[in-house]
Amino acid sequence: MQITTITGVTILQPNSVTAALTATEADNRGFILFITIVATLGGFLFGYDSGVINGTVDGLQQAFNSQSAGTGFNVASMLLGCAVGAFFAGRLADVSGRRTLLQVAAVFFVISAWGSGVADSSLEFVFYRILGGLAVGAASVMAPAYISEVAPARYRGMLTTVQQIAIIFGLFMAFISNYLLAKFAGASTAVLWLDFAAWRWMFWMELIPAVLFLLMLLFIPESPRFLVLKGKTALAKTVLTRLYGDTAATRKLTEIQQSLEGNHQPQLRDLFDKQSGKLRRIVWVGIGLATFQQLVGINVVFYYGAVLWQAVGFSESDALLINVISGALSIAACVITLLVIDKIGRKPLLKWGSVGMAITLALMVLAFANADQDANGRLLLGDWGIVALISANAYVFFFNMSWGPVMWVMLGEMFPNQIRGSGLAVSGLAQWSSNFLITMTFPLLLSGIGLAGAYGLYTLGAFCSIFFVAKMVHETKGTELEDMQG
């Protein structure tokens, strides 16, 4: 540091000023990164809560003397909870705050993890799973929205993409935890610790990240945009200063106030255009993004991956290995998106992701359509097996490089301040309802029109999404939230 003294006055030289500013900016970035990591723990629990059920089916059936706990409806019933949670979270967040809703979700995660492990009946178990679904739905829309509202525009997309990585990592850790607990006990139904079966401990392991999430939320601030909305200007200025520094905070506070000037308390009717009375275009775009993300069939791979590959002749061991490979590719694809989304933008990633998924899904349909059947009705792919395998993993890669993370990024940032909560509510409801539809119908499609027919529908969804992105989606890269138009 260079200091010059002139007639008793100490002057800080420009290089010292630069160093001080650089240190402040680095401190701000570190704080933003910290609160991003805390918020994305909700995404981790989203993935963990979705994946933990896979290792517990045998234990549930034995404990409850019923097949119902292991059926597709019980998986899908959690998704209904997700739809309700996503819908009401957006509206409630406009009333009580983004951080507050994340804290409520964390409490629900804790109760669900504990209750799912202690449940003595299918009905009790389903109740706790739906409670977990409410938490997943709330976290799925609030975490990216919160990150978007605190992160600078220049790397907002990168930070929000961390949410998708957290989701996939949560799934992966649930699979690892289930595997280790079952192996240590000898089976998921065997007694492990304190005279409780291993499958119960699989749910209780979620208590560790859930409690951590709840505690860490105590150390992050409320969204400054919500604080301005509630008239808490001084507190908003304090938060903005901590995020961006004093000079930038003053400018940002003015921008937020101007964007909200003349607005009233957010309401669902704000989603409709005042002049025409019709749903605003930006809301249709949100619904379309949320719906197409599911219509391409990705959750068939997540929920029925082993069923899929065993149906085309792979052994159970090989099917599980393929799922592990798909998980690794998913993480790699998300990391790529994290590095490039704020450079090349959201729309190009969505468009080329749709093109890639349409091509790879079409190749899968071609492989399934040319397969023979054995005496048990399983498809025999023969030479088409390698085509199906490569195409399926390429499809997963394209999804997780585009629609997987980018949809959440755009939903968190594209709505104007006045309707962000309500827009997220409607879009979240559309996303989880579509998820429920795809999850419930795949077994029916599999037995009715076969794999080729089912994947033909998902191919059509991917193909249509190309035109949806080209016509309806506008780029949001680098645009401040206060400049978003509805």
Image (cartoon, rainbow, N blue to C red):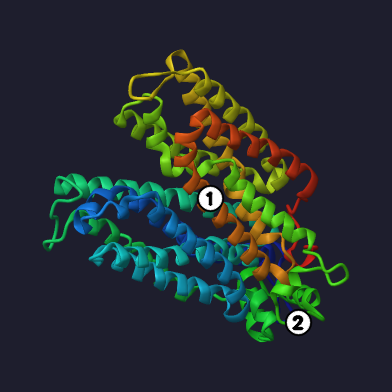
Q: Position of residue 455 (x, y in %)?
A: 55, 33
Q: Secondary structure at mark 1?
A: helix
Numbered mark located on residue 264 in the image: 2
Numbered mark located on residue 107 in the image: none
Number of marks in picture: 2
* Mark 2 → mark 1, Cα distance in angstroms: 36 Å
Indicate the quadrant where residue 144 lies: bottom right
Q: Is residue 80 visible?
A: yes
Is residue 442 left or right of 65 when viewed as pictured? right
Picture residue at 68% right of the left edge, 63% below the top: 18
Q: Which residue is at the front of the view, 31 or 78?
A: 78
Q: Is residue 469 above or below residue 325?
A: below
Q: Which residue is at the front of the view, 454 or 339?
A: 454
Picture residue at 39% right of the left edge, 57% below the top: 49
Q: Position of residue 180 (x, y in %)?
A: 23, 47
Indicate the quadrant where residue 328 lies: top left
Q: Position of residue 417 (x, y in %)?
A: 72, 70
Q: Position of residue 39 (x, y in %)?
A: 51, 64
| First along the sequence among labels 2 and 1 | 2
Q: Which residue is at the front of the view, 71 or 290?
A: 71
Q: Are marks 2 and 1 in contact (CB under 8 Å)?
A: no
Q: Residue furthest top?
A: 383
Q: Is residue 408 above or below residue 6?
A: above
Picture residue at 63% right of the left edge, 76% below the top: 94
Give amino acid for label 2. Answer: His
Q: Which residue is at the front of the view, 460 or 404?
A: 460
Give amino acid for label 1. Answer: Leu
Can you say which quadrant of the picture contains the C terminus?
A: bottom right
Is residue 404 left or right of 417 when viewed as pictured? left
Q: Residues within 10 Å of mark 2 (few under 14, many from 20)?
A: few
Residue linked to disc 1? 437
Picture residue at 54% right of the left edge, 44% below the top: 334
